[in-house]
Structures are given as C-alpha cells and as structure tokens.
Image (tube, rainbow, N blue to C red):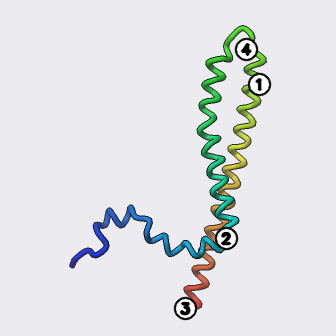
Amino acid sequence: MADIGGSPEARRRSIRPLRSLFPYVTRYRKLAIGAIISLIVAAVTTLALPMAVRRMIDHGFQASGSIFIAEYFAALVAMAALLAAASASRYYFVITLGERVVADIRRDVFAH
C-alpha cells in the first residue's frame, strides 16, 4: 500500500493538520493575541534575566557596589515578578483558548 501523505516521520513533523483548527481559533482573536503577547513578554524576560545577573556579578563587586547591588537586586525582583505575571497570563490565555476551541469542535461534531 502506497503512503500518499509521505513518510510517517514527515507527517509527524508537519503542522498542516492544525490548519483545520484555524477557523476555531480566529473566533477568539483577543485570547490568541493575549497569549502571543504574554508569550513574547515571558520569553524576553527569561532571556534578559541571565544578562542582568551577569551584569550584577561583573559590576557589583566594586568599592561602591553596595548601592549598585541593591538597585540590581530590586530590578531582578521586578523582572521575576514580570516573568511570573506573563507566565500566569500566558497560561490563562492558552488554557481558556484551548477549552473554548475544544468546546466548539465538540459542538460542531455533535451537531453533524
């Protein structure tokens, strides 16, 4: 029997089957946009944290470093809080969007 869709590995890596979900996701644009924005903020904050720690270690151990360390520690706490808020909102948006899409698909399947 010929494999029409390509090799099983290629089909597993393809996201083409997810195209059929696009109409369901577009019904909830605000949730999708919120999830994308939250993901970007969380990713940028995650990438910035090691750079801030590196800068604090590189420049914080000088003679006048106590004020610098206190300011950077406060900035690190603020960055951690931003990361926590972005991660929580991303989780909320993705879970809510997923549940609504699944409910819409379920409704359409049972209506058919």
Three-letter amino acid code at the position of disc 3: His
| Neighbour tally class for label 2: few under 14, some 14-19, many 20 plus, Cα within 10 Å | some
Residue depth check, mark 2 versus mark 1: number of the one nearer the observer = 2
Residue hosting label 1: 71
- Asked if the residue under mark 4 is in contact with the one under mark 1, i.e. CB atoms within 8 Å, the reply is no
Residue depth check, mark 2 versus mark 4: number of the one nearer the observer = 2
Asked if residue 9 lies left or right of residue 83, the reply is: left
Three-letter amino acid code at the position of disc 4: Gly
Residue hosting label 2: 28
Residue 65 marker = 4
State which tag comes first along the sequence, 2 or 1: 2
Q: Residue 3 falls in which quadrant of the image?
A: bottom left
Identify the residue at horizontal 65%, vertical 58% (top origin).
35
Q: Residue 44 falls in which quadrant of the image?
A: top right
Q: Marks 3 and 1, how far apart in space?
A: 61 Å
Three-letter amino acid code at the position of disc 1: Glu
Q: Marks 1 and 4, how far apart in space?
A: 10 Å
Q: Secondary structure at mark 1?
A: helix
Residue at the top extreme of this rendering: 63
Identify the residue at horizontal 58%, vertical 85% (top origin).
108
Q: Quadrant of the N terminus?
A: bottom left
State which tag comes first along the sequence, 3 or 4: 4
State which tag comes first along the sequence, 3 or 1: 1
Q: Position of residue 88 (x, y in %)?
A: 69, 52
Residue 112 marker = 3
Q: Secondary structure at mark 3?
A: loop
Three-letter amino acid code at the position of disc 2: Tyr
| Neighbour tally class for label 4: few under 14, some 14-19, many 20 plus, Cα within 10 Å | few
